[in-house]
């Protein structure tokens, strides 16, 4: 068993044990202190809250079973009334615990065994809830949206961005297909959080950082914590062993490690650039409605601008893609930005309407 699998197994066991204790009530002062200390780990808190939902379903199921046993003893029963099923048990027959036992091949178990069985089922479902996905998320033009993932992590997606999330007992993985996403990751040493954007892989345990996946490059900026960045051919990136972060110590898996206030750019066609120093609060600056660039290619800037524009900006000449620009503008000032491009770059700006009446801005080379 690996170190991560061992930690996962321990959390499942501890979650089940604490649920049984807290539901029984009357915790001693020492047990209350121990429980509070255990919940200081956000991964434990998330596991407990999710599992509590399962526990409540089990309690509802027991009540349903008792009701049906009473009905069987001759109490009033409407033969035409549907049987009520709740939560995770809705896929099982309407006969309460007896149906559950039968469903799991345990029809010989007596009803008094329900408490033991509930504990067994709880442990199974705690483990089950750690396996999620794949789930897809996407935003529309001009839309910024925050999502809470199954592990308690928060992701804020920039306009016109898309990602797919999957989780299991070994890792939490996000495939950022395009756009920007700012991650506030719940700490869980047992399951690294991995973001893949093109041929760049970012890996953390619990931190706050931004990943940009544009047409020409991937940019990673860290607001808080430690981020590992690997870059290269996808099959080689995936072959790199997973990292485990312990405190501030890093068991390295990647050629570069970023900390708060650092940024790295990875070209789709080239190696990683050198690490840059930035203000930590500039990671995901777009969340404040501002786009800022320091010597960035025009293709990247135009792609970002199009995420916030009802029309479209088109580069008519491939040579324009590599023009470099340092600029800053608000996401509601894209039109003004485009209108002044010919003052700072060798481009001509022409506006027209497409067949659907949508505004198109075409950038031509002046040469």
Image (cartoon, rainbow, N blue to C red):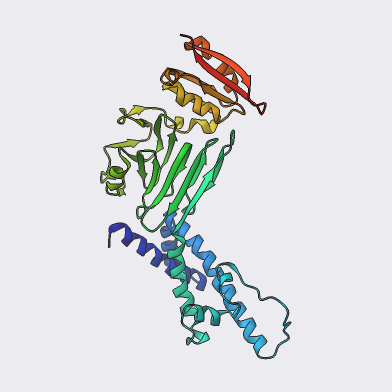
Location of the N terminus (image quadrant): bottom left
Question: Residue 190: horizontal and vertical position, in percent?
Answer: 35, 55
- Can you name the residue that lies furthest to the front here? 355
Q: Is residue 248 visible?
A: no
Q: Is residue 84 above or below residue 111?
A: above
- The residue located at (45%, 29%) in the rendering is 282
Q: Is residue 349 visible?
A: yes
Q: Is residue 136 above or below residue 322?
A: below
Quadrant location of residue 131? bottom left
- The residue located at (57%, 23%) in the rendering is 334
Question: Residue 178: horizontal and vertical position, in percent?
Answer: 47, 37
Q: Is residue 235 left or right of residue 287?
A: left
- The residue located at (48%, 38%) in the rendering is 181
Q: In front: 16, or 331?
A: 331
- Can you name the residue that lies furthest to the bottom here? 73
Quadrant location of residue 4? bottom left
Q: In front: 280, or 199?
A: 199
Question: Residue 321: horizontal and vertical position, in percent?
Answer: 43, 21
**How many discs mark residues in the rendered view?**
0
Q: In front: 8, or 303?
A: 303
Question: Residue 120: horizontal and vertical position, in percent?
Answer: 44, 74
């Amino acid at each position: 068993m690996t170190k991560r699998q061992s930690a996962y197994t321990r959390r499942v066991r501890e979650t089940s044990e604490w649920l049984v204790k807290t539901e029984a009530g009357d915790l001693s002062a020492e047990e209350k202190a121990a429980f509070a200390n255990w919940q200081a780990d956000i991964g434990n808190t998330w596991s407990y809250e999710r599992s509590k939902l399962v526990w409540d379903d089990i309690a509802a199921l027991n009540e349903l079973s008792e009701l049906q046993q009473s009905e069987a003893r001759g109490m009033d029963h409407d033969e035409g009334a549907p049987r009520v099923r709740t939560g995770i048990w809705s896929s099982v027959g309407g006969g309460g615990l007896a149906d559950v036992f039968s469903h799991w091949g345990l029809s010989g178990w007596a009803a008094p065994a329900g408490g033991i069985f509930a504990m067994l089922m709880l442990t199974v479902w705690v483990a089950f809830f750690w396996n999620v996905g794949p789930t897809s998320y996407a935003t529309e033009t001009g839309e910024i949206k925050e999502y809470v993932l199954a592990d308690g992590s928060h992701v804020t997606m920039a306009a016109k961005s898309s990602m797919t999330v999957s989780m299991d007992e070994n890792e939490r993985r996000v495939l950022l297909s395009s756009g920007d996403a700012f991650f506030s990751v719940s700490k869980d040493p047992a399951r690294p959080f991995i973001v893949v954007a093109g041929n760049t892989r970012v890996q953390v345990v619990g931190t706050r950082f931004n990943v940009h996946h544009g047409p020409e490059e991937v940019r990673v900026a860290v607001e808080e914590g430690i981020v590992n960045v690997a870059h290269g051919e996808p099959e080689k990136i995936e072959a790199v062993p997973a990292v485990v972060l312990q405190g501030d110590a890093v068991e390295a898996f990647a050629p570069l490690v970023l900390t708060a206030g650092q940024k790295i750019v990875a070209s789709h066609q080239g190696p990683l650039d050198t690490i840059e120093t930035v203000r930590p609060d500039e990671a995901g600056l777009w969340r404040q409605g501002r786009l800022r660039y320091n010597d960035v290619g025009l293709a990247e800037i135009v792609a970002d601008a199009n995420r916030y524009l009802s029309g479209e900006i088109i580069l008519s000449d491939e040579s324009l893609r590599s023009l470099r620009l340092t600029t800053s503008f608000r996401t509601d000032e894209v039109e003004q930005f485009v209108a002044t491009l010919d003052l700072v770059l060798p481009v001509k700006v022409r506006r027209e309407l497409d067949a659907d009446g949508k505004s198109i801005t075409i950038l031509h080379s002046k040469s």
